[in-house]
Image (tube, rainbow, N blue to C red):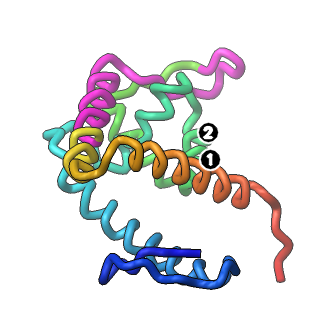
Amino acid sequence: MQLPNRTTGRQIVHESDIDAAIPQLADELMRFARVVARAKSMLNVGDLGAEFSALMLLFPLRFRGPLRATDLAEIKQADPSTVSRQVAQLVKAGLARREADPVDGRATRLAITDAGLEAVERLQEARQAWLREALNDWPADRIAAFTGLFSEFNSSVEAHLATPRENS
């Protein structure tokens, strides 16, 4: 198996054993997490009235429709109390509104507003512009190949997280 050395850019030849690649992959994932944290602050979207983490709740509302806060917490794999605080920010900023749950009138769901839809659009445009700049030197076929592999990776990790594990 060949992996690029991040320092020199040269190919490193490893045994075909997956164990040889895992340490470098783990390092690259930690590096990616740091890069993503820095990149969030570089997105030029202006003040949308809520913290970035709260704004990320707009995406499932946009693509899945109105949801209960507990559903948002599950989707985002976040603590319900954290999501509740973020939901309050979105409502206060006018990016989302509370509405009665048609299945259980005692419960409420969160629905995206027109202002929330505009915020999602701004966030998507900024994210895509940032990626376009970052990958400016990449040919389209490499971007497509990486996208396919990254999607497959994310699906594998999500499936692994969804599989119940015994405590050992």
Near-viewer residue (44 or 29): 29
Marks 2 & 1, CB-CB < 8 Å contact: yes
Q: Is residue 80 visible?
A: no
Numbered circle sitting on residue 74: 1
Q: Position of residue 5 (x, y in %)?
A: 39, 80
Tell me if residue 58 comes above or below residue 144 in the rendering. above
Residue in the foreground of this view, choosing between 136 and 103: 136
Residue holding disc 2: 71
* Quadrant location of the N terminus in the rendered image: bottom right
Q: Which labelled disc corresponds to residue 159?
A: none
Task: Decide: is 41 above or below 64.
Answer: below
The answer to whether residue 15 is magenta is no
Near mark 2 (Cα within 10 A), the count class, few <14, some 14-19 or many ≥20, is some
Compared across the picture, whether 108 is left or right of 12 comes to right
Q: Quick one: 90 or 40, which is closer to the camera? A: 40
Across and down, in percent, residue 156 comes to 67, 55
Residue drawn at (53%, 46%) of the image: 148
Taking 90 as reference, is 84 above or below it?
below
Neighbourhood count class around disc 1 (C-alpha, 10 Å): few under 14, some 14–19, many 20 upward: few
Type of amino acid under label 1: Glu
Residue located at (43% from left, 78% from top) = 11
Check the picture and name the quadrant holding the C terminus.
bottom right
Q: Amino acid at mark 2?
A: Asp
Q: Quadrant of residue 104?
A: top right
Magenta residue span: 101-127
